[in-house]
Image (tube, rainbow, N blue to C red):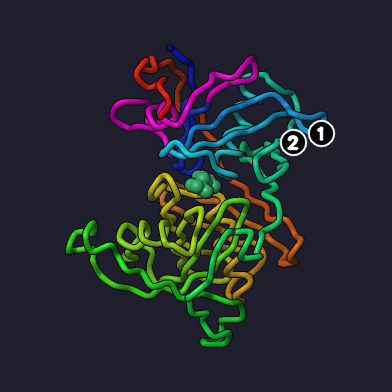
Amino acid sequence: MRIRFTKMQGAGNDFVVLDETQGRLGLGAAQYRFLADRHFGVGADQILSVRPAPSPEVDFEYVIHNADGGEVEHCGNGARCFVRYVRERGLTEKRTVRVQVQRGVIELTEADDGRVRVDMGAPVFALDQVPFDPTGLTPVPAGATPDHRWQLWSLDLQPNQASAPASQAQEAMVNVAILSMGNPHAVQLVGDVDTAPVLDHGPLIERHPAFPNRVNAGFLQIVDRGHVRLRVYERGAGETLACGTGACAAVVAGIRIGLLDHRVDVQARGGQLTIEWAGGMQDHVFMTGPATTVFEGSIELPDSLSNPA
Ligand SMILES: N[C@H](CCC[C@H](N)C(=O)O)C(=O)O
């Protein structure tokens, strides 16, 4: 089957976007993995599907699959590309678009300067909704350091000696803040993102048994109360050049710990995002950033992929 696609990126987080407004393509995990494959397919961190509104309250449905083929609840950088896509293709004239995602409804607005502002919804801190199972884990004592005003958890990163190469088989204890932006995040403070063990510890955190649905692992460097640097080892995709929900989770964690103001510029490896959160448990998080169409194309999906994965 040959399908058409649009390649897009938001701060370097890249996507294959599929127009399913005229009907479903009926793709499965193996076909999403193929599209995301940077050698045999198109190459992307996530695959975004644009679908018709499932109810009169919204304008579209937005479905996200990670590079590993798994469907996920939310994608912030993808949301900005979504609104750029539907406006560029004339699928809507609206400047503010309401979109149904797995976690609920989000509002996307294309600003005059070409950036896109997304209402990312409220963060979720209830551990069972992340989900996160603290059984057997050690809570970091609140006040352990002057800036720890929020419960962090110590994770024991026992690499699987059998699979981890000797260079990576380092035991480690990391203190993480746990929250959800619709998708799960574990954020830790580091002194320098450039030297943080993102590729060593990222996979160990992603698959830590305390996260029944796995987790996105954020490495947050505080520059000052209005500026941070961030790297994210994403669930189902590995380290990406930017992670929108990860930027939201990291800034929310920094504000709750008492280290950040309510509007923060986040410098990711692929670009800059601006995150705003007033700090109330019901307050929504707002993200502003770029969205770019890179190219359009078509690709033949091998018939062998159509068999159930
Ligand atoms: N890897 C994420 C989904 C994509 C999130 C990220 N690309 C963003 O911009 O928010 C997860 O499994 O929850």
Q: Where's the N terminus, which quadrant?
A: top left
Which image quadrant for residue 122? bottom right
Q: Amino acid at mark 2?
A: Arg
Q: Nearer the viewer, residue 92 or 57?
A: 57
Task: Please state the horizontal and vertical placement of residue 262, each as a whole percent of the image.
Answer: 67, 65
Task: Please state the horizontal and vertical placement of residue 176, each as a whole percent of the image.
Answer: 49, 70
Q: Is residue 300 above or below residue 200?
A: above
Identify the element where label 2 is drawn: strand
Identify residue for label 1.
57
Q: Hey, which residue is sitting farthest left in the picture?
A: 166
Task: Please state the horizontal and vertical placement of residue 115, each as a whole percent of the image.
Answer: 61, 40
Q: Hey, which residue is sitting farthest right in the picture?
A: 56
Q: Is residue 38 magenta?
A: yes
Q: Is residue 217 magenta?
A: no
- Using a 10 Å C-alpha cutoff, classify the residue at mark 2 as few (fewer than 14 neighbours), some (14 to 19) or many (20 or more): some
At 54% across and 75% down in the image, what residue appears? 152
At 55% across and 36% down in the image, what residue appears? 64
Looking at the image, is mark 2 or mark 1 nearer the viewer?
1
| Tag of residue 259 | none
Q: Amino acid at mark 1?
A: Glu
Q: Hey, which residue is sitting farthest top in the picture?
A: 1
- Residue range of the region highlighted in magenta in the rendering: 18-45
Question: Label 1 near label 2: C-beta < 8 Å?
Answer: yes
- Using a 10 Å C-alpha cutoff, classify the residue at mark 1 as few (fewer than 14 neighbours), some (14 to 19) or many (20 or more): few
Numbered label tally: 2
Which image quadrant for residue 217? bottom left
Q: Is residue 147 above or below residue 274?
A: below
